[in-house]
Amino acid sequence: MSHDKWPDYLLYRNIIRKSLLIVGLWPEEKPKILYRFLPFPFLFANTFVTLGIIFYIKMHSLNFNKAMKGLSMMPSFLTVNLKIICVMIHRDEAITLHNLLDLHYTELLSDQRVSKAILTGSRIFRNLSWVFTLLGVIIISTIAMTPIISLIDQQSHAVNPIHYPHVYPTKYPWSSDPLNFSHKIHFFIEYVAVVTHFCASHLDALFMMYGYQMICQFREMSHRITHIDVMTFDITAIKQCVQQHQLMMKCRDIMQRIFGPILLVVWSANAISMCSFIFQITQIKSISIPMMMTSTGYVVLKLLQTFIYAFTGTCLTSESVHYQQAIYDADWQRNRRFMTSILIMLTQEPIILTACSFSVISLDLFIKVSTLLHHVDKIKFPTFTYFQFLNATVSYFFLLQAVS
């Protein structure tokens, strides 16, 4: 890897690693007992706030606008809970996936023969992750600082009695007097939930990083197969390609088990959250510039989160198709033994990520690759596209308008 690219990759990887280490979701090799139980306090805090939001919605069930305020936050909390649970259940498989991809990727970067091909297009993956992280910091910071700013503003204006706001729109079934210790406990737990949201959001970036590392391995296989000496028939290179393709299929299966349920919920939850949030904005008579910037950032963040999954899935499938094309383009006609091996390798299906065997993770609206569509059409899966996600969001929004 070129010296100017290496620090960028390390910074990109370390941010994801350190964020997930905080909540115990990074696939650490041979994790200790304490690390395995680390996600539980964060899961408890997130569930605690989720129950508070449910009671808030129930209390304001007759006030549509306030109920929508709580409803817009609910899908995000359920998604974070699901992320934590999925990683905890499949922790051993996550470690296996990490060892198969991350360690091999580091080795590839030190190989001058393939490092240039591997780095092609890496910037867009890193930039998407940076933008996603930056928007997450802005939104989370706004949520965390709003109660503090409110208290400072009330004290500076000598407001009496002081209103102690919650971090999230919550209401608990027991007494929560601001002067009691219980309110401080609620306040602390809600801030733990803020940390949980920010750190768990890096699982989306981890999915994209793993997807890109799989893409790099397909590029390595394409380079190997196109540089085989046909006349000498390097059987070792053929075996390496076959074995590596089997490992990629194993990685695909693990990613589908870990991220498949998350993806289905993310797409549905984001559509609900976005339309609820946009609906709240349309009900406000006057909106300040900071609120407008925060609202825009929130909508863009949810769109980008969905885009990350769809974009990664499509790029991975496209690269696996390019690998098959590289196999076909090899000079296999000149050697009968080589021809037999190539024909067998061409029977391999392209790698296609699916969410719980329900839908293909794709971005058909933005990426139209004829060879990709040719192979995808052979597999009978309903395809949940990025366009369908946007269509669902708009449909939910107009439904809310009609109800109100």
Image: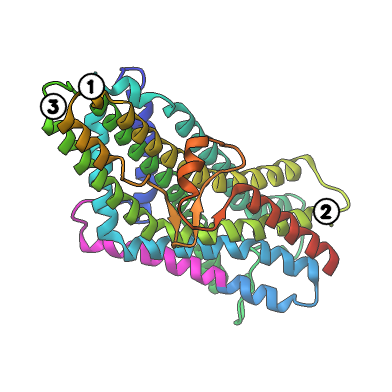
Does dot 1 land on a helix, a strand or a loop?
loop
* x 30%, y 29%: residue: 222
Q: Is residue 45 magenta?
A: yes
The residue indicated by pointer 2 is 282
**Label 3, label 1: how many angstroms apart (C-alpha)?**
11 Å
- Quarter residue 69 falls in: bottom right
Q: In this view, does 319 lie above or below 250?
A: above
Looking at this view, is 169 or 369 the one in front?
Answer: 369
Which sits in the foreground, 232 or 115? 232
Residues shaded magenta: 27-50
Which residue occupies 59% across, 60% down? Answer: 269
From the viewer's side, name the closer residue of 292 and 218: 218
Tell me the element at label 2: helix
* Residue matched to label 3: 233
Return the x and y of residue 82 as percentages of the image width and height.
Answer: 46, 64
Q: Is residue 301 left or right of residue 281?
A: left
3 or 2: tag closer to the N-terminus: 3
